[in-house]
Amino acid sequence: MKFTRTTTVGLFKFIINFTGNSKTMLQPLLSINHVTVRNLNNTLFTGLNFNINKGEHWALIGASGSGKSALLQTIAGKFNITGGDIRYHFLMNLYGRTVTAKTSSPIIS
């Protein structure tokens, strides 16, 4: 099974290509749920939601200054999440459980 879909979330456009089967589609690798991120006095994202599933290939597209790098740094744990959570399902094999980043200090300092 193959398909391509385009999703717009805020200032971002995601282009998702999927290659796999219906069983693969149900395996999440990363979930971002109602995430709000602040840095200093700026709100970078509010209520951000999306999932990345096994077999998907993503492209993140946006204008200069739209927050593409900030989103990736947030996923990497560099910015504080002030609301919601990020679930790192792909770490299940390494730690035996899903690792979740919630409202807290950054994962990476």
Image (cartoon, rainbow, N blue to C red):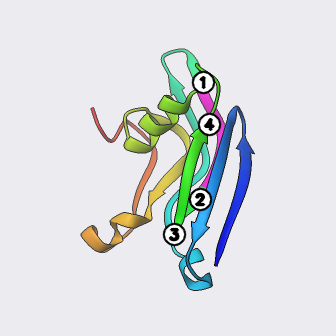
Say whether marks 3 and 1 touch (CB < 8 Å): no
Residue indicated by mark 2: 51
Residue indicated by mark 4: 61
Against 23, residue 80 (above or below) is above
Quadrant for the N terminus in the image: bottom right
Disc 2 residue type (three-letter) = Asn
Sequence-wise, the earlier of marks 4 and 2 is 2
Image depth: mark 2 or mark 3 in front: 3
- Residue nearest the viewer, comparing 99 with 22: 22
Q: Secondary structure at mark 1?
A: strand
Residue indicated by mark 3: 55
Q: Secondary structure at mark 4?
A: strand
Q: Which residues are magenta?
A: 44-50
Residue indicated by mark 1: 43
Residue 28 drawn at (x, y percent) = 52, 68
Residue 99 drawn at (x, y percent) = 37, 60
Image depth: mark 3 or mark 1 in front: 3
Relative side of 76 to 4, left or right = left
Q: Residue at the far front: name it.
A: 2
Relative side of 20 to 11, left or right = left
Relative side of 108 to 54, left or right = left
Residue 7 magenta-highlighted: no
Disc 4 residue type (three-letter) = Ile
Disc 3 residue type (three-letter) = Gly
